Image: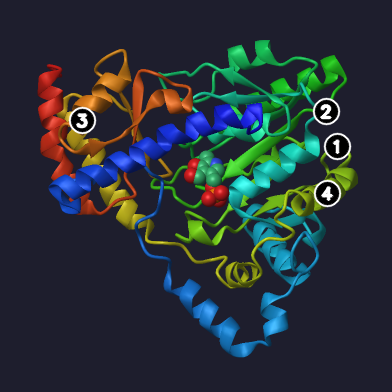
Amino acid sequence: MIAEKMVGYVKNSSLIRAMFEEGKRLADLYGAENVYDFSLGNPNVPAPKEVEDAVREILDGEDSVFVHGYMNNSGYGDVRQTIADSINKRFGTAFSENNIIMTVGAAGGLNVIFKTLLNPGDEVIAFAPYFGEYRSYTTNYDGVLVEISPNTETFQPNLVEFEQKITAKTKAVIVNTPNNPTGVIYSEETIKELAAIMEKKQKEFGTDIYLISDEPYRELVYTDAEVPYLTKYYANTIVGYSFSKTLSIPGERIGYLVIPNEVADSELVIGAANVANRILGYVNAPSLFQRVVAKCLDAKCDVEAYNRNRELLYGELSKMGYECVLPEGAFYLFVKSPTEDETIFCNECKKHNILIVPGRSFACPGYVRIAYCVAYKTIEGALPGFKAVAEAFELRK
Ligand code: PLP
């Protein structure tokens, strides 16, 4: 028999799997071009040219031990220093290679940091709506995920409830901005308030509360909105970065953690995170792609392609009477369901070959997530279906 804990994980995975299978079934029935799959955050724009150029340059130019060998668990020192220099230049920080640990994407980084920090029963606070995997990452280490209910007016975090829910057991708070699934960027004002509450609660309980900033969408921003660099607002901040979306390379599994010297017990945390990277089975982040990203720190995928999708989808759905907050970043639109039970809405969309994800997967029932990292024509093709569903639910035209 498998481990009890895995039973729940498997059940949850089968929901995602079921959606994937449904997409395939519809594609077989109606042809892939007639299925509008908005369910996955898998970038559809190609990786920037710099990525391929870097791969070729590295493979052509270096000996294979340099490219393919084992290394320190935290990654290549020169790569980490290059990343530290780039962050320092952009955000006025003062990190060195010692503050950077290369990870297997954001998912790997978050697991490393939770393994490093959590004792059984420790609480991790997340603001709904949040990326559903945070729950698994927390329970992996017998932590308890504490949810803050959503502020559906703006989708900025609900700080009143946050302050009430911090306890002596709160070990970490995780934020993700620009946000999956809303596309909202947490404002500087929000971050300052959040930091002030955390400072106050650390003093009140005499504990260390780590702020974890999960940043796979930092570079995907469509307005002139600033995405605050959180280490500058709260000393006990750890950043988890990923190149998956910025460089359209999610399958290459590459990212990094930033653990500043200002973090409580920083030397211990850095040392333990190194060991966690090893004993979780990663050993080190993928070698070739550490070298590739170091050459591509100023490169970006075609963000304008996502912007065109965003404008089309938001504009047209709003005209049909759907309610949603205009996303400033990431590549998701979070739409209020015309029915209280959003799974009914999702099923109605499915009748028009449109696949979207129920908000309950992000701890926010009554909403749905539409991932618009798809071809422009997929959005165009889905609009009549969205319109028919809007009419079926008698939304305003
Ligand atoms: N965090 C958030 C908010 C995400 O949306 C994702 C992926 O979609 C991840 C983490 C995992 O990213 P990675 O592919 O870098 O592991």
Task: Report, in whole angstroms, how far the alpha carbon at label 2 lies from the one at label 1.
Answer: 7 Å
Q: Is 318 left or right of 85, judged from the image as shown?
A: left
* Disc 1: which residue: 264
The disc labelled 2 sits on which kind of residue?
A: Asp
- Residue under pointer 4: 270
Seen from the viewer's position, the closer of residues 18 and 276 is 18
The answer to whether mark 1 is within 8 Å of ligand 1 is no
Q: Tell which tag, 3 or 2, sits nearer the viewer.
A: 3
Disc 1 marks a residue whose amino acid type is Ala
Res 327 → quadrant: top left
* Distance (Cα) linking label 3 and label 1: 48 Å
Asked which secondary structure carries label 3, the reply is: helix
Question: Who's the residue at 54% across and 57% down the image?
Answer: 243
Nearer mark to the viewer, of 1 and 4: 4
Pair 3/1: label in front: 3
Q: Which residue is mark 2?
A: 208
Q: Is residue 89 above or below residue 316?
A: below
SS at circle 1 = loop
Q: Find out whether the residues at labels 4 and 3 contact each other: C-beta distance under 8 Å.
A: no
Residue 36 on image: x %, y %: 22, 44
Of mark 1 and mark 4, the one earlier in the sequence is: 1
Label 3 to label 2: alpha-carbon separation = 46 Å
* Image location (x, y in percent) of residue 265: 89, 39
Instruction: Depth check: give the residue in front, 30 or 313.
Output: 30
Q: CA distance from mark 2 to mark 4?
A: 15 Å
The mark nearer the N terminus, 2 or 4, is: 2
Q: Is residue 223 left or right of residue 237?
A: left
Locate residue 32, reporting x and y percent: 20, 52
